[in-house]
Amino acid sequence: MIGTLENASLLDDADELASMVIHSELYAAYIASKQNAERDEQTQHLIGRFLKVREKYDEVQRFGRYHPDYKPVIKEMMESKRELDTNPLIADYKQNEKALSDLLGELSLILARSVSKSIKVPTGDPFFDRSCGTGCGSGGKCSCHTR
């Protein structure tokens, strides 16, 4: 890529946008909730337990219901996951993570759509993903055309 004044300007604008996100309340809440979860001993114990159970779960999944420990490991996995998900610090972290992810997704969508409506943007939202913004350009059933 040849460094032009236009490219440098675009990169500066991207850096400015990233800086705005990093200095936002959403990002601050995300970092605070992440640090709270990382510092809490009980939460770290739950995470460690979950990771150990997940290793057993992954092993059991290779063989499916024919594995001798299938039912006990599945039950242990569900209990461990429920315990982790109901932990207030983990719940707060996940909520803040989703809010930040949603903001980044919206930014990606806005940037892509301002360039072209046919640019494919993974939104994580099946409602948007089904739109004709796939950029197939084939003019087939979906009648998409590249611009």
Image: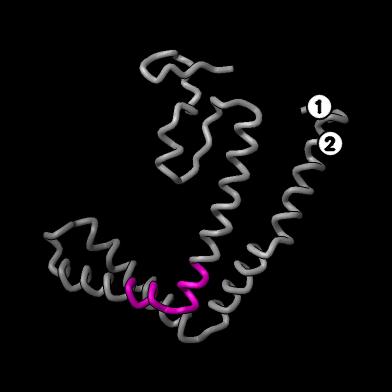
Image spot of residue 26 (x, y percent): 63, 63
**The residue tagged with tag 1: helix, strand or loop?**
loop
User: In this image, 141 relative to 128: left or right?
Assistant: left
> Residue 2: which numbered mark, if any?
1
Hey, what amino acid is under mark 1?
Ile
Q: Tell me which label, 2 or 1, sits earlier in the chain.
A: 1
Quadrant in the rendering for residue 5: top right
Image spot of residue 7 (x, y percent): 81, 32
Q: What's the magenta region?
A: 81-94
> Residue 9: which numbered mark, if any?
2
Q: In 3D space, how far apart are the residues under numbered discs 2 and 1 (Cα atoms)?
A: 13 Å
Image spot of residue 51 (x, y percent): 39, 71
User: In this image, 16 relative to 142: left or right?
Assistant: right
Q: 114 or 56: which is nearer to us?
A: 114
Image spot of residue 64 (x, y percent): 17, 57
Quarter of the picture containing the C terminus is top right
**The residue tagged with tag 2: helix, strand or loop?**
helix
Q: 113 or 9: which is nearer to us?
A: 113
**Which tag is nearer the camera, tag 2 or tag 1?**
2
Most prominent secondary structure in the magenta stretch?
A: helix
